[in-house]
């Protein structure tokens, strides 16, 4: 691509050094990545084939998989990067699939202690019962994919399951934004209906809600348990088709735009892109922004996501919170 993000495979040792240097210079013990994908190999290979074929859900964007490797190698890569906790985001596209995926996830979590035990769900009879079983089996985070599953998150069938998860305080990473291609039920409105019924539900909006960034920031400001993950946001790749809006100004907790501009004045930035300059709403919600990357299904090196966050110019305290502390606090690490 013209922006230079479609690179040759990164040199593994050099990239690991770069990633570790990033968090070491922040004084962190490592990274907490709430949005990584591990699933049965047969399912993952079908996902990769879908990306290779430029299916409609990719928006027709060329999407090379940077970390196409066997499971053991992918786990080794994250550990070399110093990712001390990560997830196994898995998701069904049809009824009857979620419970099978959850059983696979039990075994994966048992043999992968640094993985936050991940489960999933689908609008179908019995969903609340298998969500409870997954929690009993040790699930610590759920994944919901509105775009792939093509379902309304406010479907009445899901309502009891959302209630169970809200009561348990278990985070749910939900892909509900309309990027990279809109679905019938994507966007903030269906999620707003879910939150109106379950205001304590700990939804983590994947991809910062791309491209409806501001609408999902509004939801986070209205509902105190809503969080957002950074997955693919702010990267050169995503800025080509879904740039984060410069106007994301807002209702900051007791701070005006002038206050923030003064605080950031004179701070050097590696890449002072006008599209990404001073998005102060992120600073206001800084305790609820979580690092996510989409590893291994990303079309650029892992380090690029970290550097894209760094060049926002929101400061080292913000980076420490986003890349480690917020996730560590949420999951009690």
Image (cartoon, helix red, strand yellow):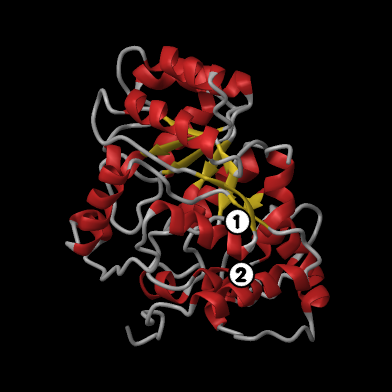
Q: What secondary structure is found at the residue carrying circle 1?
A: loop
Q: Is residue 133 visible?
A: yes
Determine whether label 1 and label 2 are within 8 Å by CB: yes
Relative to 321, say whether 81 is above or below. Answer: below
Query: For this view, does 13 lie left or right of residue 26?
Result: left
Query: For this view, does 286 lie left or right of residue 307?
Result: right
- When asked about the image quadrant of residue 97, the answer is top left
Q: Residue at 67% across / 47% down in the picture?
A: 327
Query: For this view, does 72 lie left or right of residue 285?
Result: left
Question: Residue 143: x percent and y percent?
Answer: 45, 37
Crowd around label 2: few <14 · some 14–19 · many ≥20 (10 Å): many
Whichever of labels 1 and 2 marks the residue nearer the N terminus, that label is: 1
Question: Residue 300: x percent and y percent?
Answer: 42, 73
Relative to 16, say whether 273 is above or below. Answer: below
Relative to 285, say whether 144 is above or below. Answer: above
Q: Residue at 79% across / 82% down in the picture?
A: 265
Crowd around label 1: few <14 · some 14–19 · many ≥20 (10 Å): many
Question: Residue 111: x percent and y percent?
Answer: 52, 37
Mark 1 sits on what residue?
291
Q: How many numbered discs, if any?
A: 2
Q: Residue at 28% across / 56% down in the picture?
A: 181
Disc 1 to disc 2, how far (Cα)?
9 Å
Mark 2 sits on what residue?
309
């Amino acid at each position: 691509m013209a922006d230079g993000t479609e690179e040759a495979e990164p040199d593994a040792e050099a990239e690991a050094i770069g990633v570790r240097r990033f968090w070491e210079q922040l004084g962190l013990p490592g990274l907490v990545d709430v949005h990584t994908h591990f699933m049965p190999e047969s399912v993952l290979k079908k996902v990769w084939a879908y990306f290779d074929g430029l299916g409609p859900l990719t928006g027709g964007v060329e999407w090379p998989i940077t970390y196409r490797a066997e499971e053991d190698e992918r786990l080794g890569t994250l550990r070399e990067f110093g990712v001390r906790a990560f997830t196994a985001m898995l998701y069904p596209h049809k009824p009857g699939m979620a419970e099978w995926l959850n059983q696979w996830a039990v075994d994966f979590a048992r043999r992968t202690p640094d993985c936050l035990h991940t489960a999933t769900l689908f609008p179908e009879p019995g969903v609340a019962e298998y969500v409870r079983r997954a929690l009993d089996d040790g699930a610590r985070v759920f994944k919901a994919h509105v775009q792939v599953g093509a379902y309304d998150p406010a479907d009445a069938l899901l309502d009891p399951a959302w209630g169970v998860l809200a009561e348990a305080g278990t985070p749910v990473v939900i892909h509900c934004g309309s990027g990279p291609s809109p679905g019938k039920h994507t966007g903030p409105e269906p999620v707003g209906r879910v939150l109106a019924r379950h205001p304590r539900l700990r939804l983590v909006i994947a991809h910062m809600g791309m491209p409806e960034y501001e609408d999902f920031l509004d939801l986070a400001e209205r509902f105190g348990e809503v969080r957002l993950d950074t997955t693919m946001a702010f990267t050169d790749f995503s800025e080509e088709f879904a740039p984060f809006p410069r106007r994301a100004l807002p209702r900051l907790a007791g701070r005006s735009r002038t206050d923030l501009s003064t605080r950031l004045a004179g701070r050097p930035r590696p890449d002072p892109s006008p599209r990404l300059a001073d998005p102060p709403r992120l600073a206001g919600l800084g305790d609820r922004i979580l690092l996510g990357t989409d590893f291994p299904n990303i079309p650029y090196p892992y380090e690029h996501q970290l550097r894209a966050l760094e060049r926002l110019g929101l400061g080292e305290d913000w980076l420490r919170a986003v890349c480690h502390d917020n996730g560590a606090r949420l999951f009690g690490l």
